[in-house]
Image: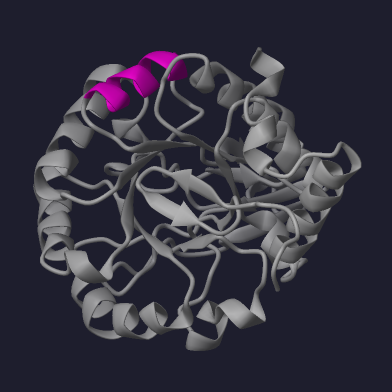
Amino acid sequence: MGWIKDLGVSCGGIELKTPVIVASGVWPFETEFWDRKSFPGLGAICTKAVTLHQREGNPGIRVWETPSGMLNSIGLQNGGVDLFLDHHVPEISQGGIPFIVNVAMEKIQETGKVLEKLERHRSSIPAVELNISCPNVSEGGMAWGTDALSSSRAVAMAREKWSGPLWVKLTPQAGDISSVARAVQDQGADALVVGNTWLGMAMDVEKGKPVFGRVFAGLSGPAIFPLALRTVWEVCSSVSIPVVGCGGIASPDDCLAMIMAGASAVEIGTLMFTHLNAGSMICSGIEEYLQSRGLDDVKDIMGIAMS
């Protein structure tokens, strides 16, 4: 599907036909899900998290529905970077949709080895999203993203190991997300993804104990959108590199709000569980908005609320 208005954007070193990206942790690796013709409206897809070694993920309940979203505690389940490079990359590269490899921050030496392996396949990988924000693991994850010093250290390592476009996914649990964003920018990040899930929990009242074995889990969905929009506004006010808004987007208006707050693009996650055509739905809504105001380019509304 082609859009009448210009919905293309340049973001963090890659060109997107639309500003709508599927967030990490959502999209399966089956090849039919990576065919651009089957999922119009998607500008790019973030892969599920990749780590150095295979991870089984967290035991017990992993997903719990809430009245306005969901909690998840997956635990970065994946087959490891070698399987990803040998099996998944050749397949998903054929679909015509740009992809961004989500690399989960573990111990700095382990993540460095992942990035070294990806660097050897640089020609096949459009961009990397360094995830310093996962709340569902005991080591690494959001511990790297909660303050400027640790975030800076992680990104400096990544910039040394990976020469391509580098996006960094921030955590809303940071005490001062603006200072983290500036530190990450200073270390050479090409774009910031703001942000990840918010910490929450659920109680099994029949059993009288927390639903999740780790007690806390990541909350996503419409409930967090106002919080996510606020963090996007704060970060866009603090840095000069592109920002990707992420968190609770459920409609074209939500996407427009993120863009008006300064975001160059958005990532959608929970919405994809109920609307596989979300990319097309959001892009159609953006196009209608632009057309109603006589505008030809989505870039005409980027950051207008901040002026």
The colour mode here is one colour
The answer to which of 283 and 244 lies nearer the viewer is: 283
Number of numbered discs on residues: 0
Residue 30 visible in image = yes
Query: Is residue 250 highlighted in magenta?
Result: no
Task: Provide residue 196's location: percent of width, then percent of height.
Answer: 51, 40
The answer to which of 159 and 53 lies nearer the viewer is: 159
From the viewer's perspective, is 64 left or right of 53? Answer: right
Q: Quadrant of the C terminus?
A: top right
Looking at the image, which residue is at 69% across and 69% down? 2
The region drawn magenta spans: 176-186
Looking at the image, which residue is at 57% across and 36% down? 198
Residue lying at the far right of the rendered structure: 292
Q: Is residue 200 above or below residue 120?
A: above
Task: Provide residue 33's location: percent of width, then percent of height.
Answer: 56, 80
Looking at the image, which residue is at 55% across and 82% down? 35
The answer to which of 41 and 50 lies nearer the viewer is: 41
| Image quadrant in which you'd find residue 138 | top left
Task: Provide residue 159's location: percent of width, then percent of height.
Answer: 16, 40
From the viewer's perspective, is 105 left or right of 27? Answer: left
Task: Provide residue 210's location: percent of width, then percent of height.
Answer: 62, 46
The answer to which of 240 and 177 lies nearer the viewer is: 240
The chief SS type of the magenta part is: helix
Residue 175 visible in image = no
Q: Is residue 162 above or below residue 74?
A: above
From the viewer's perspective, is 117 left or right of 172? Answer: left
Q: Quadrant of the N terminus?
A: bottom right
| Image quadrant in which you'd find residue 149 | top left
Looking at the image, which residue is at 30% across and 75% down? 79
